[in-house]
Structures are given as C-alpha cells and as structure tokens.
Image: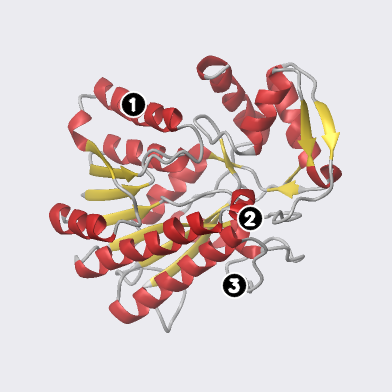
C-alpha cells in the first residue's frame, strides 16, 4: 500500500515509517524539521531509515518531503499528487511544559495541522487515518487504570486540550464523511532515538555528566512508561484494523467509523524507581534536586489496554529495566 506518515523525522514517526517500508509498503514521510529540539537529531533519524533500508535494498520505498502540516495548500497538493491509501498522522508540536509559554505553536501544528490532514483524507478517499492522541487527555483523574470510556473533559495543559480536540475533530469527520479514523492515546513513550526534552534523555544526560536532576513533586509521581518498539507494534497492527470494515469490533454504534485505543505498558512506575532503572543501566548514582509539582503535569498515568489487546491480540509488555538499558546503551553509543 501507499502510506503518508506525518512527523516522519520524529521519535515515533521515523520508526513507524521505517517498519512500514521494511514490510514492503510505499511510504512518503513529511516533517517541518522545526527547532523545538536540535534538527540534527531529526536528520539523523531520517538517515537511519535510509541506512536500514539500504541493507535490504528497499531505499526506493521511502521518500521524505519537508513540509509543514499548517501549509494548507502544500498538504492539499500532496494528497492530490500522491493518492495515499492510508495515513498515519504522528506529526504534532509535542511537550506539555512548552505549551505553557508557546501556545500558538500548538494551535498551528496540532489543530490547523490535523485539520489539513483530515481534509486531505476526506477529499482523496483515504481508507484509514490513524492519528496520535495522548494519555494527557485524562488530566488528573483519580480513577485508575485510565479507560477509553472515561470522561476527558478537564485537560490541565493546552497540549492535552489540543489532543482532545483532535479526537473530537476525527469523530466529526468519521460521522459526517464516513472517514475511518482511529486515535491512539500514547502513554509516556521512551527508548532509543527518543526526544531530548523528555525525562529519560534529560535524566540520563545529567546523571552521566555528574549533574543533579530535577525531581518534581518530590518524586511522588507515577508514569506508565511504554517502550518505543511496543508503541510501533501497536500502531502497525491498528492501522490494518479499519473501522467499519468487515469483522471490525464496533466500539460506537452511532459512529462505527470512529475508534480510540490506549497504548500503554499497563504497569505504572514510581518516578524514584524510574531513576533507579537509569542508575542501574548507567552504573552511576543520581544526584537529586527535589522540587514542587510543575504546572501542567499530572500525578499519574495508567493505561487500561484491554480494548487494544482484544482488538489486535497485542499489548505492550517490555519491562522498564530492559527498555532503559536499551536506551542508555544507545545514548552512550550515539550521543555521549
């Protein structure tokens, strides 16, 4: 098939694009290569895709186009020219804390950008749109584990609000235009080639350099850390499960073209235990600077993945110790 992968130079998008091409699909990847973090890392991820595909003589299966999601004409022309069969929309302005000081970046990328993708899918008969949502939509709710049927009406960051908005936009397009859409609520993704603004990278870098790490809410946080390979496996399985197709496990009787799944490890880890996993992998003890809770942060995340497991026969299961060892080994080899 022919796929569009947005955010193809990103942490998750680059790996999804690579795996799709390895499976023999034609993949066009787009990204605006912005400087939210060092674009050199994004270019290195794109180079990695070509290196991997070169070993299997499949380099012709992946093409990259630098393009901003908010470029309405550019995205419209892309859809008209390429005639994609399926779209995996992973491009977005990421980061909860960054959204507090830079809200317009999230409006452009996450709202306008998702709208251009929905319009492209609508007008060019895309058979399935899979898009990234986030566990942040659950806010600070106390009930755990978080289920797709829980109310998510109280986001505590603009980032979370844009992700919930993406779900509502997709629901509307599924209802009005019978566009099959599937939203995936990712839970704290980590692993090799990850983002430098996220805790695994920031903590590992500081610990290896002998600097203190900032530990918010005095370490009293729980996160459902999910390894990158598990996330990618979930995305690849879900993209092949098209809502409203024959045999599809209907979730919404009044809108069978719309689906939503959590993808998480279903094993929340205390922040102190997460730091210990880095210490063990790196062989270095952390110096800790305990701080109050940061604005926009949530106290816990915990994914109920029953729907995902029932639908595709898979759920993330990589233990944190194994995943963090993989990350630290990669960091020492590629970054340090």
Give x and y (percent) for residue 302: 68, 55
**In which image quadrant can residue 46 be found?**
top left
The structure residue drawn at horizontal position 63% and vertical position 71%, both measured from the top left corner, is 150
Q: CA distance from mark 3 to mark 1?
A: 40 Å
**Sequence-wise, which precedes: disc 3 or disc 1?**
1
> Which callout, 3 or 1, points to the residue nearer the camera?
1
Q: CA distance from mark 3 to mark 2?
A: 28 Å
Q: Are marks 3 and 1 in contact (CB under 8 Å)?
A: no
Q: Which residue is mark 1?
A: 47
> Which callout, 1 or 2, points to the residue nearer the camera?
2
**Sequence-wise, which precedes: disc 1 or disc 2?**
1
Give x and y (percent) for residue 139: 68, 63
Q: Which residue is mark 3?
A: 149
Q: Which residue is mark 2?
A: 100
Q: Nearer the viewer, residue 86 or 336?
A: 336
**In which image quadrant can residue 254 be found?**
bottom left
| Label 2: how many Cα within 10 Å (few below 14, some 14–19, many 20+) | some
Look at the picture and state if 49 lies above or below 267.
Answer: above
In the picture provided, is 60 more to the left or to the right than 288?
A: left
């Amino acid at each position: 098939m022919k796929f569009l992968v947005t955010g193809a130079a990103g942490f998750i998008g680059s790996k999804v694009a690579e795996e799709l091409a390895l499976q023999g699909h034609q993949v066009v990847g787009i990204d605006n290569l912005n400087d939210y973090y060092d674009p050199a890392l994004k270019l290195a991820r794109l180079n990695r895709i070509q290196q991997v595909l070169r070993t299997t003589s499949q380099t012709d299966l992946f093409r990259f186009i630098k393009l901003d999601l908010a470029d309405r004409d550019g995205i419209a022309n892309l859809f008209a020219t390429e005639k994609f069969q399926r779209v995996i929309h992973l491009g977005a302005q990421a980061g909860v804390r960054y959204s507090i000081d830079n809200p317009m970046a999230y409006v452009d990328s996450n709202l306008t950008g998702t709208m251009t993708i929905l319009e492209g899918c609508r007008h060019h008969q895309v058979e399935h749109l899979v898009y990234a949502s986030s566990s942040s939509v659950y806010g600070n709710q106390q009930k755990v584990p978080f289920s797709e049927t829980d109310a998510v009406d109280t986001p505590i960051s603009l980032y979370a609000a844009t992700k919930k908005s993406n779900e509502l936009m997709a629901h509307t397009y599924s209802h009005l235009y019978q566009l099959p859409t599937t939203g995936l609520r990712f839970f704290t993704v980590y692993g090799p080639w990850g983002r430098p603004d996220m805790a695994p990278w920031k903590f590992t870098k500081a610990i290896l350099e002998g600097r203190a790490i900032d530990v918010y809410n005095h370490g009293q946080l729980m996160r459902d850390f999910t390894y990158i390979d598990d996330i990618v496996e979930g995305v690849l399985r879900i993209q092949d499960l098209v809502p409203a197709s024959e045999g599809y496990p209907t979730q919404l009787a009044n809108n069978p073209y719309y689906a939503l799944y959590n993808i998480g490890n279903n094993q929340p880890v205390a922040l102190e235990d997460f730091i210990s996993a880095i210490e063990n992998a790196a062989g270095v003890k952390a110096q800790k600077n305990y701080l109050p809770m940061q604005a926009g942060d949530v106290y816990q995340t915990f994914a109920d993945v029953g729907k995902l497991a029932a639908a595709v026969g898979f759920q993330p299961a990589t233990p944190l110790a194994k995943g963090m060892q993989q990350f630290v080994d990669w960091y020492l080899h590629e970054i340090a």
